[in-house]
Amino acid sequence: MNNILEFKKQELKLLENSNFSNQNPMRFLKWFLKNAQSFTKVDLKKSEEVSVKTDSQIKMCYHNCWKALLDYRKFRYFEGFVWSKELPLPLEHSWLVDTKGRVIDPTLIINAQETARQMKKKYGIEDHFKRQFRIGDEYLGIEFPYKKLNKLVFQYKRTGSFLPELFLSGEI
């Protein structure tokens, strides 16, 4: 599969062939591609269990996964990109990985069709999803050390993408 990997390699080529004077995005992307791991197997049952237990919210992937680590310490936390056949581009995302290398995604398992119905009822916003769940078809990301993640969450008093901080720290 490796659609995300190919997409990111093309992005790197564009940066390398441009007159872009700031080299940091190129260095970051090279670092990401060198250290990223790809996943295509998702444990839907466990994803749903974790989502319900942690009261995960749509569009809150970083917070949902960080919160889930409090109860599921054997899981590993990843940040990177998710690709779905329904989306034209990979999206920044976070997820967990179990001891068997399967993705646990407490955010994208949330029932997209039900969420769309609730959004229409509450806000009048119309949205249509082809699939009930928006689980990714491919995930590409870097494992984030648990202690480093907690340190940043408490330092910044928020969750969110911390990949740039991990890159700049030189720890990976």
Image (spheres, rainbow, N blue to C red):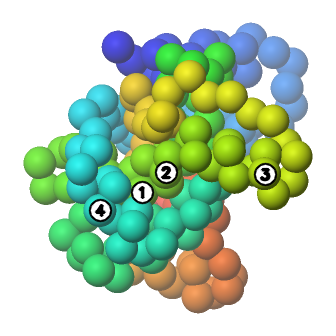
Q: Residues within 10 Å of mark 2 (few under 14, many from 20)?
A: many
* Image location (x, y in percent) of residue 28: 61, 42
The residue under label 2 is 110
Looking at the rendered image, the disc whose residue lies closer to the viewer, 4 or 1, is: 4
Looking at the rendered image, the disc whose residue lies closer to the viewer, 2 or 3, is: 3
Q: Disc 2 and disc 3: Cα gap in Å?
A: 18 Å
Mark carried by residue 106: 1
Q: Residue at x 50, y 66 (%)?
A: 56
Label 1 secondary element: loop
Q: Disc 1 and disc 2: Cα gap in Å?
A: 7 Å
* Image location (x, y in percent) of residue 144: 41, 61
What amino acid is labelled 4 in the image?
Answer: Glu
What amino acid is labelled 1 in the image?
Answer: Pro
The residue under label 4 is 49
Q: Quadrant of residue 53?
A: bottom left
Label 2 secondary element: loop
Q: Residues within 10 Å of mark 3 (few under 14, many from 20)?
A: few
Q: Residue at x 46, y 37 (%)?
A: 133
**Quadrant including the N terminus:** top left
Q: Quadrant of residue 72?
A: bottom left
Label 3 secondary element: helix
Query: Where is 65 relative to 154, above or below?
Result: above
The residue under label 3 is 121
The residue closer to the viewer here, 120 or 102, is 120
